[in-house]
């Protein structure tokens, strides 16, 4: 249960922030990269399950899925990859080794009740 432990650490981060600011969290926004190995649906389910005994119960997990991108040597700009197994530019097919995004797994924002 990879997603469950991730959900729990997201809850920890949100809870700590909420306690510090003395607010009630209503939603947690996160970014999940295509290369992070996290399944968004599984994470959403784990989050719901894991937060039901915490002050975050009933809050929403808002997932922004970030596609994998590489710096294409030919196009000269970041381009989406043709697949996450082959890090080639989706446009011209050049292989790129510099991943510019897609490995993210981070809490980006908290929504709180007034
Ligand atoms: Zn290219």
Image (cartoon, rainbow, N blue to C red):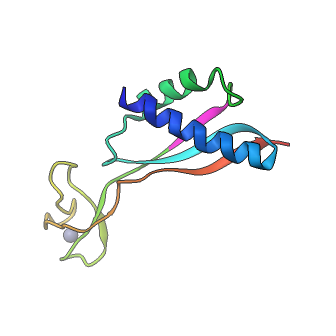
Q: Examine the rendered structure and indicate whether residue 36 appears above or below residue 95.
A: above
Location of residue 91 (image quadrant) = bottom left
Q: Is residue 13 above or below residue 60?
A: below
Most extreme residue toward the right is: 114
Q: Is residue 24 magenta?
A: no
Residue range highlighted in magenta: 59-63
Q: Is residue 60 left or right of residue 39?
A: right
Q: In the figure, 27 relative to 83: above or below?
A: above
Q: Looking at the picture, how far across and down is residue 23, in whole percent?
A: 80, 42
Q: Nearer the viewer, residue 3 or 5?
A: 5
Write the residue at 69% across / 47% down. Answer: 17
Query: Residue 6 appears at what percent x and percent y?
Result: 45, 37
Above or below, 113 relative to 95: above
Q: Residue at x 73, y 43 (%)?
A: 18
Total numbered labels placed on residues in the image = 0
Q: Position of residue 48 (x, y in %)?
A: 57, 24
Where ligand 1 lies, by quadrant?
Answer: bottom left
Relative to 87, 39 lies left or right: right
Question: What secondary structure is the magenta-colored segment mainly?
Answer: strand
- Could you tell me which residue is drawn at 30 percent across and 49 percent down? 35
Horizontal arrangement in the rendering, residue 109 relative to residue 68 (left or right): right
Return the residue nearer the eye: 50 or 101.
Answer: 50
Identify the residue at horizontal 35%, vertical 54% (top origin). 103
């Amino acid at each position: 249960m990879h997603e469950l432990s991730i959900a729990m650490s997201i809850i920890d981060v949100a809870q700590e922030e909420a306690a510090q600011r003395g607010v009630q969290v209503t939603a947690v926004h996160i970014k999940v990269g295509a290369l992070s190995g996290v399944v968004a649906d599984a994470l959403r389910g784990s989050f719901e399950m894991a937060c039901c005994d915490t002050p975050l119960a009933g809050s929403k997990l808002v997932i922004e899925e970030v596609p994998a991108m590489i710096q294409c040597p030919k196009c000269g700009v970041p381009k989406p990859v043709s697949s996450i197994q082959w890090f080639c530019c989706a446009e011209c097919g050049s292989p790129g080794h510099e991943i510019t995004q897609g490995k993210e797994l981070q809490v980006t924002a908290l929504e709180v009740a007034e």
